[in-house]
Image (cartoon, rainbow, N blue to C red):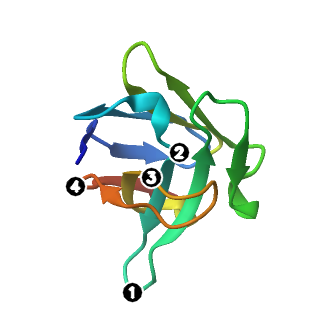
Amino acid sequence: QVQLVESRGGLVQAGGSLRLSCVVSGRTFSDYVMHWFRQAPGKEREMVASISGFGGRTVYKESVTGRFTISRDNGKNTVYLQMNRLEPEDTAVYYCAAGGMLGGSPNSWGQGTQVTVSS
Protein backbone atom coordinates (compact mmCIF):
# COMPACT_ATOMS: atom_id res chain seq x y z
CA GLN A 1 0.00 0.00 0.00
CA VAL A 2 1.32 3.43 -0.93
CA GLN A 3 0.24 6.89 0.10
CA LEU A 4 0.33 9.78 -2.35
CA VAL A 5 0.14 13.44 -1.43
CA GLU A 6 -0.08 16.06 -4.16
CA SER A 7 1.04 19.63 -3.83
CA ARG A 8 -1.52 22.39 -3.97
CA GLY A 9 -2.64 23.37 -7.45
CA GLY A 10 -3.80 26.85 -8.17
CA LEU A 11 -5.20 29.49 -10.46
CA VAL A 12 -3.11 30.57 -13.43
CA GLN A 13 -3.72 32.65 -16.50
CA ALA A 14 -3.76 31.09 -19.93
CA GLY A 15 -0.24 30.83 -21.27
CA GLY A 16 1.22 30.51 -17.81
CA SER A 17 3.01 27.67 -16.07
CA LEU A 18 2.50 25.56 -12.99
CA ARG A 19 4.37 22.62 -11.48
CA LEU A 20 2.64 19.91 -9.50
CA SER A 21 4.49 17.52 -7.25
CA CYS A 22 3.47 14.33 -5.50
CA VAL A 23 5.30 12.69 -2.62
CA VAL A 24 4.89 8.93 -2.30
CA SER A 25 5.45 6.83 0.80
CA GLY A 26 4.92 3.26 1.87
CA ARG A 27 6.84 1.18 -0.65
CA THR A 28 9.92 1.28 -2.87
CA PHE A 29 9.19 4.25 -5.09
CA SER A 30 11.20 3.09 -8.09
CA ASP A 31 9.10 -0.09 -8.26
CA TYR A 32 6.16 1.96 -9.45
CA VAL A 33 5.14 3.43 -12.72
CA MET A 34 3.78 6.86 -11.83
CA HIS A 35 0.99 8.78 -13.52
CA TRP A 36 -0.85 12.05 -13.60
CA PHE A 37 -4.54 11.94 -14.43
CA ARG A 38 -7.09 14.72 -14.55
CA GLN A 39 -10.84 15.08 -14.43
CA ALA A 40 -12.68 18.13 -15.69
CA PRO A 41 -16.26 18.90 -14.63
CA GLY A 42 -18.70 16.66 -16.43
CA LYS A 43 -15.95 14.60 -18.04
CA GLU A 44 -14.33 11.26 -17.38
CA ARG A 45 -10.97 11.01 -15.69
CA GLU A 46 -8.19 10.82 -18.27
CA MET A 47 -4.50 9.98 -18.28
CA VAL A 48 -2.26 12.99 -18.76
CA ALA A 49 1.19 11.44 -18.46
CA SER A 50 2.98 8.34 -17.21
CA ILE A 51 6.62 7.66 -16.38
CA SER A 52 8.46 4.39 -15.86
CA GLY A 53 10.15 3.42 -12.61
CA PHE A 54 13.54 4.90 -13.42
CA GLY A 55 12.24 7.62 -15.70
CA GLY A 56 13.51 6.21 -18.96
CA ARG A 57 10.13 6.07 -20.66
CA THR A 58 7.22 8.48 -20.70
CA VAL A 59 3.79 8.57 -22.29
CA TYR A 60 1.63 11.68 -22.77
CA LYS A 61 -1.92 12.53 -23.73
CA GLU A 62 -1.70 13.96 -27.21
CA SER A 63 -3.14 17.36 -26.32
CA VAL A 64 -0.45 18.03 -23.69
CA THR A 65 2.54 16.73 -25.64
CA GLY A 66 5.13 19.47 -25.94
CA ARG A 67 3.54 21.52 -23.15
CA PHE A 68 3.65 19.19 -20.14
CA THR A 69 6.60 17.24 -18.79
CA ILE A 70 6.46 14.41 -16.27
CA SER A 71 9.58 13.63 -14.28
CA ARG A 72 10.55 11.87 -11.07
CA ASP A 73 13.21 12.04 -8.40
CA ASN A 74 13.55 8.59 -6.89
CA GLY A 75 15.83 9.92 -4.17
CA LYS A 76 12.96 12.14 -2.97
CA ASN A 77 10.10 9.72 -3.72
CA THR A 78 8.54 12.48 -5.76
CA VAL A 79 6.94 12.75 -9.17
CA TYR A 80 6.42 16.08 -10.91
CA LEU A 81 4.23 17.48 -13.64
CA GLN A 82 5.57 20.66 -15.21
CA MET A 83 2.76 22.36 -17.12
CA ASN A 84 3.62 25.13 -19.57
CA ARG A 85 1.50 27.16 -22.00
CA LEU A 86 -1.58 26.28 -20.00
CA GLU A 87 -4.95 26.54 -21.68
CA PRO A 88 -8.44 26.94 -20.18
CA GLU A 89 -9.12 23.39 -21.39
CA ASP A 90 -6.49 22.18 -18.92
CA THR A 91 -8.74 23.19 -16.01
CA ALA A 92 -9.39 20.06 -13.96
CA VAL A 93 -8.70 18.22 -10.75
CA TYR A 94 -5.29 16.61 -11.20
CA TYR A 95 -4.52 13.27 -9.57
CA CYS A 96 -1.21 11.62 -8.90
CA ALA A 97 -1.39 7.83 -9.21
CA ALA A 98 0.89 4.83 -8.83
CA GLY A 99 1.17 1.33 -10.20
CA GLY A 100 0.01 -0.51 -13.25
CA MET A 101 1.54 -0.23 -16.67
CA LEU A 102 2.94 2.78 -18.48
CA GLY A 103 -0.09 4.58 -19.88
CA GLY A 104 -2.39 2.12 -18.13
CA SER A 105 -4.59 1.97 -15.05
CA PRO A 106 -2.99 2.71 -11.68
CA ASN A 107 -3.62 0.94 -8.39
CA SER A 108 -3.32 3.82 -5.94
CA TRP A 109 -4.47 7.42 -6.10
CA GLY A 110 -3.80 10.72 -4.43
CA GLN A 111 -6.56 12.99 -3.21
CA GLY A 112 -6.45 15.34 -6.19
CA THR A 113 -5.63 19.01 -6.55
CA GLN A 114 -7.51 21.70 -8.44
CA VAL A 115 -5.86 23.50 -11.35
CA THR A 116 -7.82 26.36 -12.87
CA VAL A 117 -6.68 28.19 -15.99
CA SER A 118 -8.37 31.49 -16.68
CA SER A 119 -8.73 32.91 -20.17
| Image point (63%, 54%), residue name | 102
Assess whether mark 3 and mark 2 are in contact (beta carbons under 8 angstroms).
yes
Sequence-earlier tag: 2 or 3? 2
| Image point (56%, 49%), residue name | 14
- Using a 10 Å C-alpha cutoff, classify the residue at mark 3 as few (fewer than 14 neighbours), some (14 to 19) or many (20 or more): many
The Cα atoms of the two marked residues, 2 and 3, are separated by 5 Å
Q: Quadrant of residue 4?
A: top left
Sequence-earlier tag: 4 or 1? 1
Assess whether mark 3 and mark 1 are in contact (beta carbons under 8 angstroms).
no
Q: Which residue is mark 4?
A: 111
Tell me the element at label 1. loop
The answer to whether residue 15 is above or below residue 111 is: above
The answer to whether residue 46 is above or below residue 79 is: below
> Residue 86 in the image: x percent, y percent?
59, 48
Sequence-earlier tag: 2 or 1? 2
> Residue 60 in the image: x percent, y percent?
69, 54
| Image point (50%, 50%), residue name | 35
Q: Nearer the viewer, mark 4 or mark 1?
A: 4
The Cα atoms of the two marked residues, 1 and 3, are separated by 26 Å
Say what amino acid the circle numbered 2 marks: Val
Say what amino acid the circle numbered 3 marks: Gly
Q: Which residue is mark 1?
A: 42
> Residue 39 in the image: x percent, y percent?
41, 70
Task: Specify the label residue 99 is tagged with.
Answer: 3
The Cα atoms of the two marked residues, 4 and 1, are separated by 18 Å
Say what amino acid the circle numbered 1 marks: Gly
Task: Specify the label residue 104 is tagged with.
Answer: none
Q: Which residue is mark 2?
A: 33
